[in-house]
Image (tube, rainbow, N blue to C red):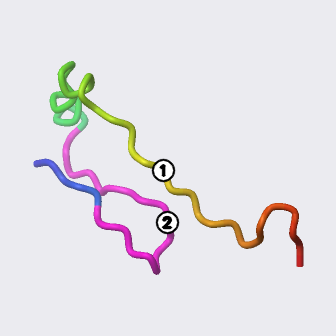
């Protein structure tokens, strides 16, 4: 069974995760050479800094 990551909630911690229910073997079988070749990096969105660069309280 394949699971998708949950949609981000703006009120939650910006770290995302997926709870895996597949066995190690199922994950390895899913990632075929073709799927690996077609895979694209996930967009990384960093949290906004509290202060602009160089500014302090």
Residue closest to the eye, 27 or 43: 43
Tell me the chief SS of the magenta region: loop
Q: Position of residue 48 (x, y in %)?
A: 62, 66
> Magenta residues, as a range?
6-23
Q: Which mark lies nearer to you, 2 or 1?
A: 1
Q: Give yes or no for contact between labels 2 and 1 (Cβ–Cβ under 8 Å).
A: no
Residue closest to the eye, 17 or 44: 44
Residue under label 2:
14
The residue positioned 37% from the left and 68% from the top of the image is 8
Relative to 30, say whether 52 is above or below. below
**Distance between the Cα atoms at labels 2 and 1?**
10 Å
Relative to 22, say whether 36 is above or below. above
* Labels 2 and 1: the sequence-earlier one: 2
Residue under label 1:
44
> Which labelled disc corresponds to residue 57?
none
The residue positioned 21% from the left and 40% from the top of the image is 23
Left or right for 57, reference 11: right
């Amino acid at each position: 069974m394949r699971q998708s990551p949950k949609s981000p909630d703006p009120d939650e911690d910006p770290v995302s995760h997926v709870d895996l229910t597949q066995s190690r073997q199922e994950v390895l079988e899913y990632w075929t050479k073709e799927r690996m070749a077609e895979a694209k990096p996930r967009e990384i969105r960093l949290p906004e800094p509290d202060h602009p660069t160089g500014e302090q309280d």
